[in-house]
Amino acid sequence: MMKYTFVDNSDIEGLEKVFGVSVVYLELDEKNRVLREVGVDASGEIVHVFPAKKGEYGRYGIFDSQTVSASSEVDPLFFRELWDKALR
């Protein structure tokens, strides 16, 4: 079963400075490995999507299949809508 969460500048110092994103929404598998990610900047614009051909961080993404603790839940429908918007 997939889980959905997010990380922001309060979780990772320098996230915005290094990657240009304020929040990264994540889809996790049953072992909490990152499968998909959507990054949003401070103005609310989608600036990163992985995996996708237009992903700025190459074929690995920001989290590169890392295991992430899902402490903050995101509604799966919200993630899907954000993902679909990112791919347009």
Image (cartoon, grey):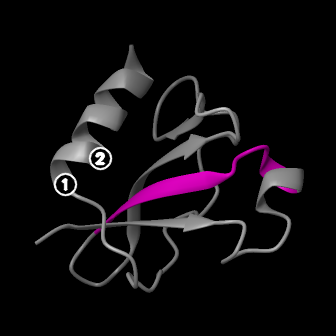
Crowd tier of the residue under label 2, counting other residues whose Cα lies within 10 Å: few below 14, some 14–19, many 20 or above? many
Residue at left offset 82%, top offset 73%: 13
- The answer to which image quadrant residue 44 occupies is top right
Residue at left offset 39%, top offset 77%: 72
Q: Disc 2 designates what residue?
A: 79
Please say if the residues under marks 2 and 1 sit with CB atoms less than 8 Å apart.
yes
Q: Amino acid at mark 1?
A: Pro
Left or right of 74? Residue 88 is right
Crowd tier of the residue under label 1, counting other residues whose Cα lies within 10 Å: few below 14, some 14–19, many 20 or above? some
Q: Nearer the viewer, residue 66 or 8?
A: 8
Q: CA distance from mark 2 to mark 1?
A: 5 Å
Instruction: Identify the residue at the far left of this view.
Output: 1
Q: Amino acid at mark 2?
A: Phe
In the image, is residue 83 above or below residue 26?
above
Magenta stretch: give its range.
Answer: 18-28
Left or right of 41? Residue 13 is right
Q: Disc 1 designates what residue?
A: 76
**Residue 16 in the image, given as x and y percentages of width and height:** 80, 53
